[in-house]
Image: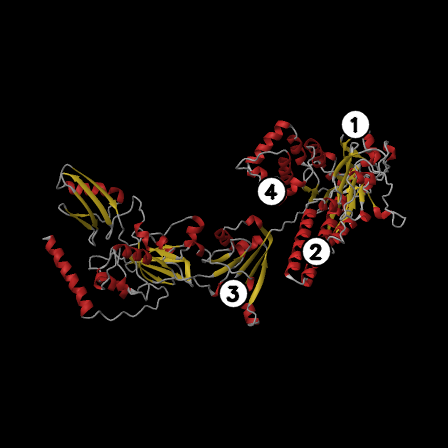
Amino acid sequence: MLKSIRSSLRVVTLAAVFSACVLGAPAKAQQSQLPFPFMDMSQQNAGAAGQGGVGNNSLGDYPQGVDTNRMPRGGVAGANSGLNGGQTSKASSNTATQAALVKPLPERPIGPFQRFVQETTGRLLPLFGENVLQKTVDLNDLNTPVSSDYEIGAGDELFISIWGAVDVSVTATVDRDGQINIPSVGTFPVAGVKARNLDQHLSNQVGKYFRNFKLSTSLGKLGGVSIYVAGQALAPGMHRVASTSTLASVLFGVAQPGLNGSFRDVQLRRGGETVAKFDLYELLRNGQLSGDRKLQSGDVVYVGATGPRIALNVEGPAAAIFELKPGETLQDVLQISGVDQSFLRKDQVLIEGFSAQTNAANPQAPRAVEQLAYARALTEAKLKDGDIVTLFQNRLAFSNDVTLKGNVADPARYPYFDGMRVADLVPNTDALIRPDYFRKKSALVGYNKDLNDKALLTDKRLYDSLSFEEQAKFRERLRQEKVDLPKNTSVESGSPSAEKNNENKNQQDPKLEVVEDTIRNLLPSINWDYAVIERLDRKELKPVLVPFNLRKAMAKDPEHNLALQPGDVVTIFSVEDADIPKTRKTALIKVTGEVSAPGYYQVAPGETLRDVLVKAGGLTENAFLFGTKVTRKSILKQQQEQFQKALDQAERLLLAATNKNAASALNPAEAANVQAQAVQQRAYLDRLRGTKPDGRVVVNVQPEATRIAELPPLVLEDGDTVAVPAVPGQVGIYGSVYTQGAFAYQKGKTVFDYLNLAGGAAKSSDTGSIFVLRANGTVESAQQGWIPFVSGLRGERALPGDVIYVPEDFERVSFMKGLLDISQIFYQVGLGAAAVNALQK
């Protein structure tokens, strides 16, 4: 009987489709003028007719303008796909279905009041609550899991398995009467049964006819319900939504308020009556779902017109446009917005709005500004439609603070009291010891240092907590101590160029370097002569600096222990913050070489080279006082700057000469020779670039000097290095000679005696330009003689450590002509040794 009924229905359905396709389809329904590009009612009904008439498995409507005859209906391919000749596979049909089920909602326009607020305040404020609304409707939600309280309804899909006395596995859809049909078993009502009770309910129903069986059910695709969205909605019309939908859930999706729609007056109408009202603000503000109801097929969701709107102009994300209900105050608006009221100024609130009195008096300027105290505005301000409420952030000003900063133990704001002076803020030297002093001091202990290094290497957060300078010093110490970094180290390796520069540095005694680091970096020296109070002149509104002597202020000298005022900022400087006079600096000098006690020594302002050598225990028997080398950081900096300028000038000279020679070349062979010369000259420049200045200060002392008193009274500076070498036993001869190298020093021999030992000058040499680099850093040359045509070095005695250099005759050797000018540049900046070293390579 059932089979015959189903066959009849199938014949009727196919006949209806055939007649629609062959005899002509009904006239196309007039397209809806609704703003939401979904199908209107006539399109929805046509879609239902095309699916065989058994329910409506469509999960939603399709956009206007889309040929719905080419789109599959519901979760399976519709009958229309076959009638249109579509040989589309099931996979492609499902893909098209999934794409059609995710539909964009109309873009929310900017309302007139939003534009008005933007023009008034310069800020485009959102409507409160619009950021939580969806921008698309995902109709695949019909496949989402449901709670155990879900009630089975028409169109729901059930997977049923029965085994034992009855062996059935079937997928059944609840019909419009709320029943399902299980083949060979029967038809049973399930509408209204909760999901958690479904197994027990069907077991009881089937148990009326069978015994000794087991039954299991699960939910498949939900049937969905059709609802109507009306009023001031963003997308009015009929929509298919999940059967689990509630009034609140559709408000975030298909039933969103439109341009003039209310977020606070959304009604659910059923059977011509209003059964529920929903306020979205209540949900967002208090988490209340009062008024929420589960939707049923045929329900109407009505979005009312918006109520009065005001703009809350405040710093931060709480700024928005709010809809008011009758009787609500500014206090209610602030609670809805979630703004932190503790950061709002309590002295004033500005309210801009339309005023009837102002409009009557001056129609061209209908708005007025009202200023109220914060407490009064919260409850007494009469907010009207179109008001803009501006609240200000609290100022960062203090009424009773005095700020202490700089090289101090605890930089902070301190409370001012009557009669407060500098000595009250900095009472003793403990207030000037920075906290990192104790941390650095703890790291000096061997085992603590190792543990600290391990922590810094493995914990990036700890490493990042160091200052940039501390990180650089830590990396440099690891490099000097040749520490192997683990693979997952937190320390970033230096750049290749930095590593290359480090390799070029002179290797120093790491133990002495640690001592220097300890002395210099544990605690910066305080500038006792200068500290300053920064004070705001309230009358002129400009900062005023009041300097004072810190040492005298702490000694409570009335002239410097100045009275403080609220708002003052007291800054304590170190000697590194300002270049104080040398006469007030305590210098740290490194002494190495042939002295009794090499190491670091502090010298008072005005102390000299002689004084520091005395502090180092004096000279040893093997000391070569003539070769004493003093290097100075300030001189090194100057030499580096001049050296770079010389390199740039030499490079320009070389380029100009190369271009000139290339332009004057008469044949390819000569042009190739010019290029070869340019390559050789550039190689010379590259070797010069690899030479680093040393910042040496020439000490003028007699070669036979053996006593400290014979040294000049050179005043030392902080960071100077004094190196006293041992007596050298050789004299070097290089350049255009037949045998280059070092020869044993013999007392009494002259410069030309050593030239003869080297075989004399070569034919290509320039004997008129021979020069000698002395161990004390001075240079003597053949051109210094006062007798014409007689070398200035004739009869000049050679000294231990001398370097004799015989240059090529640049005028004879073509490619060396350019190097002559280049070398002269480096002699002019006091870097003749650099040129010599580069030439002899």
The amino acid type found where label 3 is placed reads Phe
Element type at mark 2: helix
Element type at mark 4: loop
Please give the residue where the numbered disc 3 appears in the rendered image: 116
Looking at marks 4 and 1 on the same chain, the residue that comes earlier in the sequence is marked by 4
Please give the residue where the numbered disc 1 appears in the rendered image: 596
Of residues 623 and 497, the one nearer the viewer is 623
x and y percentages locating residue 551 in the rendered image: 79, 38
- Which label sits in the foreground, 2 or 4? 2
Q: CA distance from mark 3 to mark 4?
A: 56 Å
- Which label sits in the foreground, 4 or 1? 1
- For the point 23% across and 64% down, which residue is it? 84
Please give the residue where the numbered disc 2 appears in the rendered image: 654
Q: Residue 515: which disc?
A: none
Q: CA distance from mark 1 to mark 3?
A: 86 Å
How many C-alpha atoms fall within 10 Å of the one at disc 4: few (<14), some, or many (≥20)? few
Q: CA distance from mark 2 to mark 3?
A: 69 Å
- Which label sits in the foreground, 1 or 2? 2
Q: Looking at the rendering, which quadrant does residue 415 occupy?
A: top right
